[in-house]
Structure formats: C-alpha cells, structure tokens
Image (spheres, rainbow, N blue to C red):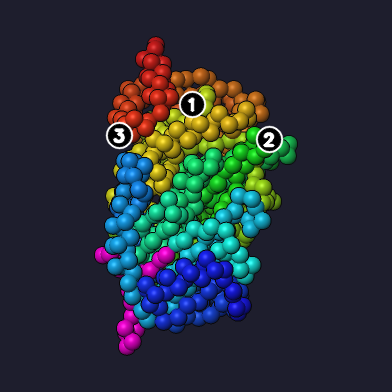
C-alpha cells in the first residue's frame, strides 16, 4: 500500500478528529487493490461480511445489518445553518453551535478500540471542471469498502485531497470498544443517531448508523444536501436524478435526466432494456445529477457517483436485465436473503423462493410467514462500469447535454402516465407539485402519499421556497431550456393492479418524449400540460388509454387545494409564479 503524504489542511483535520475520537490507529485510504483485500479480510473476520459462492457470484459479499439500522432516518437528519429560516419548513433545523457541542460530546472517544479510516474521494470524473473532492473519516470498514465502489478513490485523488477546499464528513458507528471487548458484526448506536449538516462550513457529522445514506456521506449528505446549497450560491443544480441517453432507430441520441423519489424507479429507468425495436437506453447515472450551463447555454450533467446503491427487491431478469448483469460480480449485498448455495435472493428475483433460504435476519425462511426473506430496503452496491448498458460518455469530464428533464412519483390515481410542461414556469410547478407514496427507503410508514417536491424533500439543504426560486431563476439563464415532463408508472386499475406494465415498456413513454422534442409527436393542450394524442404514443395492445390518462376534474381540484395549503407552508419565500400557475390551472379546469 502506498504511503500517502497528505496536505497540511487535511493533516490538521485528521489530527483534530484523532484527538477527539481517540482511535487505536489511523489508516489513510489509497484505493489500492491490496488495501481492498485487507479490508475485505477484516470484514470477513469480523463476520460483517459473508463471502458469497465464488462460482456463482465472484468477489461478492453479503452483510446483514442490525434490524434497527436498515434505512435513512429523516427524523434524525438536521440542517445546522446560522439562520433557522434558511433551513425552511421541510428540514429539521438545529443551531450550529449547540449541535457542535452535542456532537463533540458524542464523538469524544467514540473510536476507541477501532481503526480510523480517512477516505479521500472525488465526486465526478477527476479531470472534470465540475468535480469536487470530499474526505470522509469513518470507523466503519463497511463504509470504506462501499465508498470504494460508490465514489472515485485512488492514490492521486488521495494526494490531491486537501489542496482545494474539500467537504469534511465525519462518521462513527458510535460504539467504542474496550480492550477485552469483541466487536459485533454490525455495530451501531441508533439510540444516539444524528446526521448533521453544516452547509455554511461544508461539514457533515454522522453518528450512530452504518447504513446507506446515513453513513455513506458522499451520497445524499454531500452530493445533495451540501451540494444543493453550493449550487444555489453558484448557479448550478444538484439533483436527485438519474441520467440516460435515448437513441432512436435512426441513430439520433438525446440525453435526459429524471427525478423520482427514493425507491420509485430511477435505477430501473437508468438501466432500461428497450422493448421497442430499434430504440436504446444507455446509462450515465442512476441517482444523482449535477447540472451546469456551459458557455453555449447548454445544460450539461455529470454523475458525481461511480457506483450504484440500488434497491434489490423487485430486481429480476424480467424487470431489469441490465441490473441483473451489473450484479454478477464485485458487489456488496446488504440485507438480502441467502440461498443454500451461498448466493443471494430477494422478493421478485424469481417467481418462487428457492428452498433452504436464510432470511436477512439470519433465520430459516418460512414461505408461509408474512415476513419477507429480504428486507424491503435491501440494497446492492455495484460498480457502475459493470453496467452492460453504460453510455459512452458516462465518464466524460464535460458531462452530457440535457434535452429533457422528467419528474415522476408513485401515485395510484389522478396523475396521468405522461404530460409535458407548456413553459418553464409550468415545469417548475411540475417539480414543486410532486407527490408520491412513501417507500421503505426511509424509516417510517410505507404507502402514505406525501409531497416530495423535485424528489428533494429529504435532500434539499435549504429553504424549499428558495429552491423553487432557484429553479425559476435558472430558467432565465439560457435560450435553450430542456423540455420538461411528468410521468407516473404506478397508476392502478379497479382490481388494484398496475395499469401500466412499466420497466422495459417505459421506453414507449421515452420515445414519445424524444419525438416531442424532435417535433414529431402530437399532443393535446390541457390545463395540466400537453397530453399525448393516442396515435402518437406507442401503447401496447392490452393497455387502455383512458385508464392511463384519467380525466377527473374533481380529483384534480382536490389535488390543487391540497397543493395550495402545502405551498402556504413556505410563506413569503414561495415564488409568486407558482401561486399564479396554480391559479391558472384551476381556472382552466373549471372551464367546460
Ligand atoms: P433509490 O435508490 O431509493 O433512489 O430508488 P430508485 O428511484 O432508484 O428506485 P428503483 O429503480 O430501485 O425501484 C424501486 C422499486 O420500484 C423496485 O422494487 C422496482 O422493482 C420498482 N419499479 C421500478 N420501476 C418500476 C416500474 O416501471 N413499474 C413498477 N410497477 N415498479 C417499478
Ligand atoms: C435513497 O433513499 O434515495 C437512496 C438510498 O438512494 S440512500 O443512499 O440510503 O439514501
Ligand atoms: Mn436515491
């Protein structure tokens, strides 16, 4: 392993953290293969990782978490900025000084008996003008090995870290070990859980959880909460969006981004296998997009991440063939079930569960039980470069030019399969009006419809009203704004079954979007946007247009009334354009 010489700025911070947390030793991560093997060996010895069958799943591992530590915890996630009003009504605010005092108390000696890992990483292609450096200090080797897949980590990045301002992220599972004490397989301290963001000084402090977005601080904490604050100040976007290219049978290619709330279909759309002959979708990113105007006024997007942290349940060769290929090797699986051949399984992978399964809770699986074999928020961590449908520009330092932005949510009624915004103002209204049924990605009730503007409810690091204003202002920056759409794959019919086949069939909707941009698809103007003419949308034969485009004025009025009261929670910071757009739609709906 390389001996990393760190910059003065980074060394000072390492020393500060070391004297606060009192680890046994410090390990500066260099991203080498030997280092990876050493970490894997430690994780296997500690029983955090179970090696999977190398014949079936080479170089892959299963981790099963503490049942109390299985998802993001929004209630323990804080924005600590000087002025409470700047965090806005959608965030939990905490005074920075008292939060620091509380954290310093929690972190005092919290790494005793453990190794403190210093992980310098780069978000975005290392040579991109849009890339940024972060450093996570953590006492969890599970976090380190996940970060090695999720972010760009190598010796040259480690040497560079600290040269420019870098985002500091400090993480501890919060379980110090005494000399004689053995570690458990998934240390965590969920009673003391806190995930605190200090956007003004670009710092993140996370204590008590080892899972996903609570602990892999490059992802939601940096690339969305801190980055959204930076983006507002510097005229760019940090969004919860996938990035894809769509190529038509003529070989024309357009790039699109799409924002859906957690566990609402981003990874699946990003890896879509087209069910329309001649059409192709390729992947640049599956969760986060950073977008910038270039000097020609084109909106360009990079994927700051290097891997996927995707939802396992529901992933199968029928629903997501490219996803299944992505997972063949070099992956980490968390909270899935294990087969008797030592491979992985989850609900939906096959129609029938195989015999002899062990559940994520390490129990023999009982098919009669209501308890699933895999946790509903079970996840895989996979290197993006293993995706068989990777776009050729996925690692382009200049990013890709964006022609369409798609919003979407999980709604069983009212919201049509697809519609297009008529103006940038309506586009921003589309984003601001997003609602979706909650999923297992965050702790709490599942299936409850909530407002999730721009799929950023849990991830916008500042006042949501200012965020809407930022989107409106960005629309004045260029003459060539992307076209904006709103989709809903999750409409249900009277038998409570999905009206839309979804997955690979979603290409039909992407094809309509593509053709609209090229001026080749017909649409009808309605108060809530342009709706496809049935002839312009390539519907599968067994689907019913009317079911996919419900036209229920009463339901829309209820929707608008609810939205109006939601908007009122933003007070004076709600841009007047959104109130005007709402009023205009309402007037339109009341027309015969
Ligand atoms: P995060 O990683 O939490 O941000 O989730 P995501 O937005 O990437 O969602 P993902 O693609 O992992 O899908 C979440 C769940 O929705 C999975 O169980 C999928 O099988 C299911 N899903 C995805 N796309 C569709 C679709 O088009 N139709 C239906 N019915 N289900 C879908
Ligand atoms: C999400 O919840 O949107 C995720 C998973 O992508 S996590 O990384 O845990 O935030
Ligand atoms: Mn996500």
Determine the main secondary structure of the stretch shown in magenta. loop
Where is residue 177 shown, x and y percent of the image? 33, 80
Q: Earlier in the sequence, mark 1 or mark 2?
A: 2
Going by the image, does 403 lie left or right of 499?
A: right
Question: Looking at the image, which residue is at 50% across and 81% down?
Answer: 41
Q: Which mark is residue 409?
A: none
Q: Which residue is mark 2?
A: 296
**Which of the 4 quarters of the picture holds residue 123?**
bottom right
Mark 1 and mark 2: span between their CA atoms?
Answer: 22 Å
The residue shown at (60%, 78%) is 3
- Magenta segment: 170-193
Q: Position of residue 198 (x, y in %)?
A: 40, 54
Please tell me whether residue 172 belongs to the stretch shown in magenta.
yes
Mark 2 or mark 3: which comes first in sequence? Answer: 2
Q: Give SS at disc 2.
A: loop
Residue underneath mark 3: 569
Q: Position of residue 589 (x, y in %)?
A: 39, 18
Quadrant of the rendering where the N terminus is positioned: bottom right
Distance from Cα at disc 1 to Cα at disc 3: 20 Å
Which residue lies under the disc numbered 1? Answer: 425
Rendered image quadrant of residue 139: bottom left
Q: Residue at x 62, y 42 (%)?
A: 300
| Residue 578 belongs to the span the image colors magenta | no
């Amino acid at each position: 392993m390389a001996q990393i010489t760190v910059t003065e700025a980074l060394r000072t911070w390492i020393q500060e953290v070391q004297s606060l947390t009192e680890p046994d030793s410090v390990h500066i991560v260099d991203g080498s293969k030997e280092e990876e093997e050493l970490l894997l060996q430690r994780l296997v010895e500690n029983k955090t990782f179970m090696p999977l069958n190398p014949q079936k799943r080479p170089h892959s591992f299963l981790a099963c978490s503490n049942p109390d530590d299985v998802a993001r915890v929004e209630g323990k996630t804080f924005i600590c900025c000087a002025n409470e009003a700047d965090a806005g009504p959608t965030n939990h605010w905490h005074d920075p000084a008292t939060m620091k005092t509380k954290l310093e108390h929690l972190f005092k000696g919290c790494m005793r008996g453990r190794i403190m890992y210093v992980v310098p990483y780069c978000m975005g292609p290392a040579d991109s003008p849009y890339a940024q450096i972060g450093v996570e200090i953590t006492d969890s080797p599970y976090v380190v090995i996940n970060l090695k897949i999720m972010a760009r980590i190598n010796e040259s990045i480690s040497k560079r870290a600290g040269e420019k301002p870098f985002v500091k992220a400090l993480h501890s599972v919060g379980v110090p070990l005494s000399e004689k004490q053995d570690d458990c397989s998934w240390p965590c301290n969920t009673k003391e859980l806190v995930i605190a963001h200090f956007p003004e000084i670009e710092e993140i402090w996370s204590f008590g959880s080892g899972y996903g977005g609570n602990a892999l601080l490059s992802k939601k904490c940096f690339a969305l909460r801190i980055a959204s604050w930076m983006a507002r100040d510097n005229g760019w976007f940090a969004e919860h969006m996938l990035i894809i290219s769509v190529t038509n049978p003529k070989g024309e290619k357009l790039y699109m981004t799409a924002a859906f709330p957690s566990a609402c279909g981003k990874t699946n759309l990003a890896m879509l296998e087209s069910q329309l002959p001649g059409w192709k979708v390729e992947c640049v990113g599956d969760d986060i997009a950073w977008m910038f105007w270039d000097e020609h006024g084109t909106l360009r997007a990079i994927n700051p991440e290097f891997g996927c942290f995707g939802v396992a349940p529901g992933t199968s060769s029928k629903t997501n063939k490219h996803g299944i290929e992505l997972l063949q090797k070099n992956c980490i699986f968390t909270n899935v079930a294990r087969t008797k051949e030592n491979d992985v399984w989850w609900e939906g992978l096959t129609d029938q569960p195989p015999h002899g399964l062990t559940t994520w809770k390490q129990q023999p699986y009982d098919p009669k039980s209501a308890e699933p074999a895999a946790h509903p928020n079970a996840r895989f961590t996979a290197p993006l470069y293993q995706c068989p449908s990777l776009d050729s520009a996925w690692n382009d330092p200049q990013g890709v030019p964006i022609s369409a932005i798609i919003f979407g949510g999980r709604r069983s009624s009212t919201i049509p399969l697809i519609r297009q915004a008529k103006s940038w103002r309506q586009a921003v209204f589309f984003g601001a009006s997003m609602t979706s049924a909650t999923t297992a990605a965050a702790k709490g009730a599942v299936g409850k419809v909530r407002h999730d503007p721009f799929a950023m409810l849990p991830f916008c690091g500042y006042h949501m009203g200012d965020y809407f204003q930022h989107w409106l202002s960005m629309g004045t920056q260029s003459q060539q704004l992307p076209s904006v759409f709103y989709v809903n794959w999750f409409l249900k019919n009277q038998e409570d079954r999905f009206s839309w086949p979804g997955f690979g069939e979603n290409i039909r909707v992407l094809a309509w979007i593509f053709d609209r941009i090229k001026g080749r698809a017909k649409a009808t103007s309605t108060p809530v946007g342009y709706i496809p003419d049935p002839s312009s949308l390539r519907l599968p034969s067994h689907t019913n247009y009317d079911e996919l485009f419900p036209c229920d004025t009463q339901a829309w009025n209820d929707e608008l009334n609810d939205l109006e009261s939601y908007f009122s929670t933003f007070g004076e910071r709600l841009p007047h354009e959104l109130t005007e757009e709402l009023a205009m739609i309402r007037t339109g709906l009341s027309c015969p």
